[in-house]
Each structure stands twice: as structure tokens, then as C-alpha cells.
Image (tube, coloured by chain):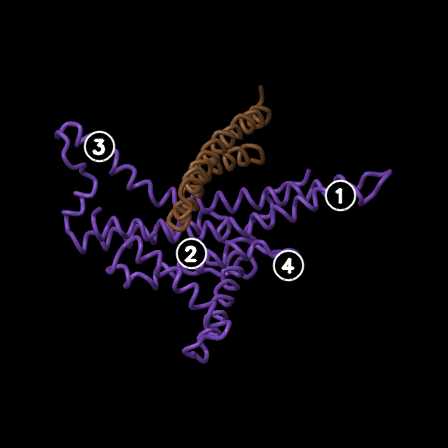
Amino acid sequence: MANPMEQFEVVTKVPLELGGYDVSFTNSSLWMMVALIGVAAFLFIGTASPKLVPNRAQAAVEYLYDFVRKILDENVGPEGRRFVPLIFSLFIFVLACNLLGLIPWVGAFTPTSHIAVTFGLAILVFVIVCIVGFARHGLHFFSLFWPKGVNPALGAFVFLIEFLSFLSRPFTLAIRLFANMTAGHVLLKVFGTFVVALGSFGALPYVLGVVPLAVNVALSALEVLIAVVQAYVFALLASIYLNDAINLH
Amino acid sequence: MDLASASKIAAGLAAMGAGLAAIGVGSIFGQYLGGVARNPEADAKLGGRLIFGFAVTEALGLIAAVVALALAFS
């Protein structure tokens, strides 16, 4: 069986170096740029000639914007409006990167299947949450972890546990996204090798290969759903963490 | 036992974590169906939380799966 982990290999296209650091242009950078161009094209075309009664492209952009705005309204409240650009950028970038890896035949690469990319995004969210929390509440921010109405000994224990779980937030955010993308694409590749294996059955070539191919089609549909759901969960969790920082429960 | 065989056996053991996550995911959807069956209007309110709960539970199962894959193909 061919190695299904080879599809995640980062291949350098244009070697570049900056002050001793390797900043080469890789296939990961290429596909992140494709995601950026796709998102920019979608948004520019949608808002090109805005009308009160929107045409289809504008309605699509408005739907996405409303979706993100509702996430922030429900989870943060009126103070969440200033974070809509952040959550919208995260949501649509993660969505585009997740979906691009599902395009067959063009050698597509999923940028968010690497822990480096998803951890970068998660650390961005975590640092912004900390900055917002400390700027708004100062050291009172630590009252987020103190449980109310318990005696101090148990409270100290719960404080420690809550603090550790707060520190683990960027890690769970990153690993959730990267593991979903990696596992999904590995599954698709494994069923692809089954198609070849069953299709090369000497006595009855190609016919038996249709069964794993049908499973692969169903799995691709599932992967599209998971790509959208994981982008939504990333944005939703980022806004929940922002709510913790802004409203302190 | 050499390292290659041990890592293959470890990969098989790690993949059992996915079965435990399957119990969790089934429980979430079962509770959602039970709630919506009693009160169909709750579908609008619970829908978002359903997807969220599914994603966070699935994440733990996929962590087990990624550990298994890393061991199987390292």
C-alpha cells in the first residue's frame, strides 16, 4: 500500500533566504495564496456594485457576513461588533484552506493540515484574547478562573485546573483543526488505494473498483461538510474565548 | 521485539480511542434527537450547539486517530 502520508509533504518551489531563516515559497504558501486570491475575488465580485436588493454574488457575501455577525452577537453581545473583521477573516481563511485540499487532480494541498499553520492561527487568537482581557480588566482578568461561592481551599484547586485548561486552549484549537483535515485526507487516500487494488483484479478488471470509488465519493462529500463545520467551530470557539475575556462570564 | 513491530502494534492499540469517541458522538446526536422529538421548536435553538458539540467530541477521537497514523507511518 502506498504511503498516504506523502500527500502532506511540504515541497519547496522557490528557495528564498532572509537573514539565515528559510523563507522559501513552498506548495503550502502557494495554496494559501490561492485561498487568498479566491477569497478576495469572491468578496470583490460580491461587493462590486452594491444594490439594496442584492444580486446572487452580493447575497452570498451578505450571507457569510451575517453568519459571522450572528456568531459574535450570540456569543459576545454588543461589544462583539469590533471583532467581526477578525472572526470573519479567520473563518473565511480556514474555510478556503480546508476546501481547497479537496480539489482533485490538480495536486491540491491543504494548508490547514499542518500543525504549523493551525497553531499559528490558534496562537493568534490566544494572544488577542489575552491582550483584550488584560487591556479591559487588568489583573482582575484572573477572576475568570476563580469559582464563586466555594471555600478557599477548593477554590484554589479549581483555580489551578481552570488556569491550566485556559493555557491548553490554543493547543486544542490547533490540534482539532489539523487532526480533522489530516485524518480526512488520509482516509480518502486509503480508499483510493483500494480502488486501484480492487480494480486490478486480473479476472474482472475495473468492475470491482467501482465499490471503493463510490465510498470515496461519499467520503468526499463528508469531507466538504467537515471542512465547513471545522471552520465554523474554529470561529465559534474564537468568539467564545473572546466572550470569556470581554465579559468574564 | 524490534521498534518497527512495536510501533505497528502501538498504532493498532491507539486506534481503539476512535471507538470511544464514537460512543460520545452517538450520545450527542441521540440526546439531540430525543430533545427535538419532544419539542420540535427546539431544533432552531439546539442546531448550532449540536454541530459544536459534535466537533469538539470528534476532535478527541481524531487525536487518537492521528497518534495511530503517526505510529503506523513513522
Chain letter of disc 1 in the image = A
Above or below for B68 versus A88 = above
Q: Position of residue A133 (x, y in %)?
A: 21, 52
**In the orientation shown, which residue stands out farthest toward the right?**
A203
Q: Nearer the viewer, mark 2 or mark 4?
A: 4
Residue that carries the numbered disc 4 in the rendered image: A106
Chain containing the residue with disc 2: A
Distance between the alpha carbons at the discs numbered 3 and 2: 45 Å
Mark 1 nearby-residue class (10 Å; few <14, some 14–19, many ≥20): many
Measured in 3D between alpha carbons, the distance from the residue under mark 4 to the one under mark 3, in whole angstroms, is: 51 Å
Residue A35, image x, y percentages: 50, 62
Rounded to the nearest angstrom, the CA distance separating label 4 from label 1 is 22 Å
In the rendered image, what is the letter of the chain coloured brown? B
CA separation, marks 2 and 4?
A: 33 Å
Q: Tell me the residue that label 1 is attached to.
A: A209
The numbered mark, 2 or 1, whose residue comes first in the sequence reads 2
Give the amino acid type for the residue marked by disc 3 in the picture.
Answer: Val
Residue that carries the numbered disc 2 in the rendered image? A20
Task: Tell me which chain the residue with mark 4 is part of.
Answer: A
Q: Give the numbered dot on residue A158.
A: 3
Q: Colour of chain A?
A: purple
SS of the residue under disc 4: loop
**The N terminus of chain A - image quarter:** top right
**Residue A99 x %, y %:** 53, 56
